[in-house]
Image (tube, rainbow, N blue to C red):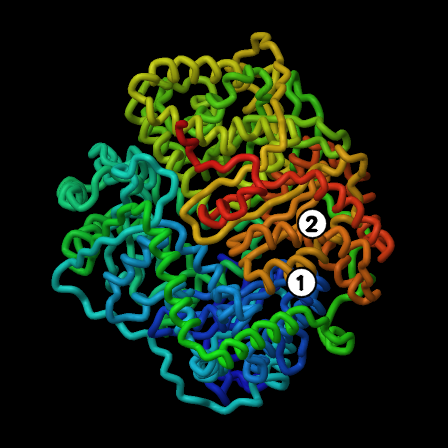
Amino acid sequence: MEYQIDQVIHGFRLRHKEYLKEIQGTAYYFEYQKTHTPLLYLSNQDNNKVFHIAFRTPSNNSTGVAHIIEHSVLDGSRKYPVKEPFVELVKGSVNTFLNAMTYPDKTVYPVASTNDKDFMNLIDVYLDAVFYPNIYQNKKIFEQEGWHYHLEDPKDKMTYNGVVYNEMKGVYSSPEEILQNELFKQLYPDSIYGKESGGFPDNIPDLTYDEFLDFHHKFYHPSNAYIYFYGDGDMEEHLKYLDEAYLSDFDYQEIDSQIALQPLFSKPAESSAYYPLSGATELNNKNYLTIGWVLNNLKDDWLAFDILTNILLGENSYPLKKALLDLNICEDISYSYTTAMRQPYFAITLKNMVGGTENKDRVRSTIKKVLQRLVKEGIDKKMLEAGINSAAFEIKEKDFGSYPPGLMFGLELMDTWLYDQDPLSHLRMDDAIAHVKTMAENGEFEKLINTQLIQNEHRAIVTLKPDPELAAKNAKALSDRLTKYQSSLSEQEIDGIVKETKDLLAYQNREDAPEDLATIPKLELSDLNAKVQTSQIARGMMDDCFVLWHPAPTDGIVYLKFYFDIRTIAQEDLAVLGILNKLLFNVRTDLYGVDEMDQMIQIHTGGISTNLEVLDDVQCEGQYQAYLSIGGKALIDQVDYLLELLFQGMTASHFDEKEIIEAILQEHRTKFENRFLTSGNVLASQRLQSYYSQSAALYQQLGGIDFGRKLSAICQSYDTSFDELSQKLLHVYKQVINRNHVKLSITCEPAQQNKIYHKVNQHLQSIDNSEQPIHTYQFDTKTANEGFMTSSKVNYVTKGFNIKRLGYEYNGSLFVLKTIMDMGYLWNRVRIKGGAYGTGFSISKAGDLIFTSYRDPHVANTLKAYDEAGQYVSDMQISQRELEKAIIGSISAKDHPLSLAMQSYVADRQFLTRQTQEWTQIERDQILSTTEADLRKCGKIIDAAMHQNALCVIGNEEKIRKNQELFNELTFIQKQSK
């Protein structure tokens, strides 16, 4: 149907429509007349439909009220009175995205699904949640998700607990988060951006229940909402639904949610702060420094500035990053830039810096000199071309991995829509690319440097220093605060808090009534596809090379990947291979210097990457394969350049530039150490598996904790060990890049396959094919049960074992159990009652059964929950409806839509791990036929795994020491000398 401007459809007046070739569809901009609610509908043929409702939610303090409301509205509503509608939805939905996000100035509630019925179910639960939440009738929701005084016995010591409270304790265990918070306070002292919308841990307990309710009442109204649809849905039916089901219930309301501007500075600001650090013997090289600018009037130059940041700091050889690294005062440099604020900002951060405030002037001076030189002499034309082409390729590819494209488009358009600007400006990507090309020709990039950076006084510089006693000081201050409060209470008041705590625990333990659970909409098993989804793949020998073919409609893009068997490397050289993986395509080659190589990659390709992959055989316990994978992508007319660059890196790299290599290694050393604070659950899980798995022990040498420690040791003795390292790198490089031990993966248009292969094959002849011995690795595995102590305020707790080693086989019913455990038992025990931000149960096809927690205030209590999980499963009683929901949720995880590049990646891994289509279909059949009895049988499997008592914890030093009887070894990131 053709819609006309000013036409009214179910209360929505069409204000604008426009065809956007970037989405291959039409954008319709409506306004709901009764409440003045704007709605943007991007209509095209993508069946992965997306909806979101967003609210402008400015907060003038750091209590985290917007964040706590985001959590709380999803805990029951008018139509859906269960405790956790969000959780129940996940169980019985085939959603492709389901979450909510709090930003500094907005809160967004997005959902996505490829199933029409499911899509409407998701929308209805979310709309009822945001407009009619149970938070007004149930204070316990606020206490659970936000904060509460926790006291189960009058004789106990009072604590704070709450999901958001513990989440933000974890966030502010990272020095980089502390640094950014301090920078924002300096850049935006009179603006909401100077506050922490997520909540600063010390301020969260200042939020009262009444303030919490007032915030929702003020901002969660259709007159303050932004509604977005994307995909092949029935637009008219969606508008009718919104009108009749929700929006017609409201009248227009004047809401003051405007984001006030921070007045511009007349001179820069400066500040310094401290962060906690545990286990470091050397503090002088653990400082941080950041300098940030508030960017004014970027308008159409938002993409140009994004490209500019890459040109300045994207690689170690780029002008500004190189100049700062040449100061030899830090190990790594990063930058951040966002337009998701009314006043965007840009910042440069120096990590693990020697000295502190005394280096501020050197940093400022260096930045100014480099920027002034670039303005005077002009930016290198090749660098500009590289930056623009790289951005253009990314825009054309639209590769968002497992995220729906419509979701990412919807979040991007909020960067302007929220501030009453054109929401489509960020989607007109052809216009944006044409604009930046014109800017490059007219010297506008240099003007951008001058106006936004050199002449811009609205900036701040912040230094951050480590304090090894700060964690203890903060813990004591918190303890004293709570002790003082507790001692000020009367016996009757303490009894009241004990009662409130027990009432909250009782509420959390309460089972939802069957009739309430029945209100949550779900699909039927008949709505699911019984046949497994498969990607097109062919395989076979071409000449003397094994090739995996992926024919696909790639819009002219070619994806190549080489898998080199790493068993040509001796066991004692595995760490060197791990370092080689970080260096390839970042060092000089026969034809190109480092900067030239990077420019050529950006100009002619969509990128080149390397990775070390250890893949367990799903059909045979203990068997695995390990590869150095090298991949690249380019448009079909640029494939010759892609191949030249790939084979330069694979056959002609040099490892003799001492300073360049040192900078790369120091950067990765810093990233490794920061992962203990930000991704401890991943590190702990990998470490745990190495206690019993040869493949996991191998990965520890290549990229895990053992590798990180060896990398740190190399960095510390770099000057004396470089010559030896350089020789070893060259030796390992020549051994692993070998034509006799490589598999090739090609993804492209079917008509291009033979052409691409023959081009690749010509280049393959340049790779050495001399015979290399194949090594057998043997690692000493033992149940180490390590506790890695950090300055973090929270913990990452893991426990598990491989069930195949215990005589059990993987079955699809275990995957159904994963859904039940994640969204049921663990959610209630570890997240809701325990206060952890996240928790999970994983079961791999290779047999690894592992429990994890994320940003968890506990250690022993969480391990106790894991140990009792088996009995819970053995005693499980589950209705047919709840079982079907778990099955549906499990199939949803299997059928998640992926980008073309991700589809090829998954298909490669399935082949390399021997997940045949027949094997995968058997698993799907087992999932779909799972019974309550099948699930209960899994209880003894969990018990058997838990009785092996293999665990690993990364987290708070004090908490780990208090539970030291659980561990065989207490250690820091870097082992301390005895």
Residue 456: image location, x then y, percent: 17, 57
Residue at (56, 68) in percent of width and height = 153
Dot label at residue 867: 2
Distance from disc 1 to disc 2, alpha carbons, whole Å, reads 25 Å
Type of the residue with mark 2: Asp
Local secondary structure at mark 1? helix
- Labels 1 and 2: the sequence-earlier one: 1
The kind of residue on which mark 1 rests is: Val
Q: Residue at x 48, y 75 (%)?
A: 226
Q: Please, is residue 459 above or below residue 357 in the view? A: below
Write down the residue under mark 1: 90
Viewer-nearest residue: 684 or 632: 684
Q: Is residue 873 above or below residue 52?
A: above
**Quadrant location of the C terminus in the rendered image:** top left
Q: Is residue 569 visible?
A: yes
Q: Position of residue 862 (x, y in %)?
A: 61, 53
Total marks in image: 2
The reply, left or right, for residue 452 in relation to residue 252 is left
Say if 657 sits above or below 236 in the image. above
Q: Nearer the viewer, mark 1 or mark 2?
A: 2
Quarter where residue 247 is shown: bottom right
Pick whichever, 445 or 806, lies toward us: 806
Residue at 47% in and 27% down: 581
Q: Is residue 416 visible?
A: no
Position of the N terminus by quadrant = bottom right
**For this rendering, which residue is in front, 568 or 750?**
568
Q: Which mark is residue 827?
A: none
Callout 2 secondary element: helix
Residue 145, percent from left and from top: 53, 69
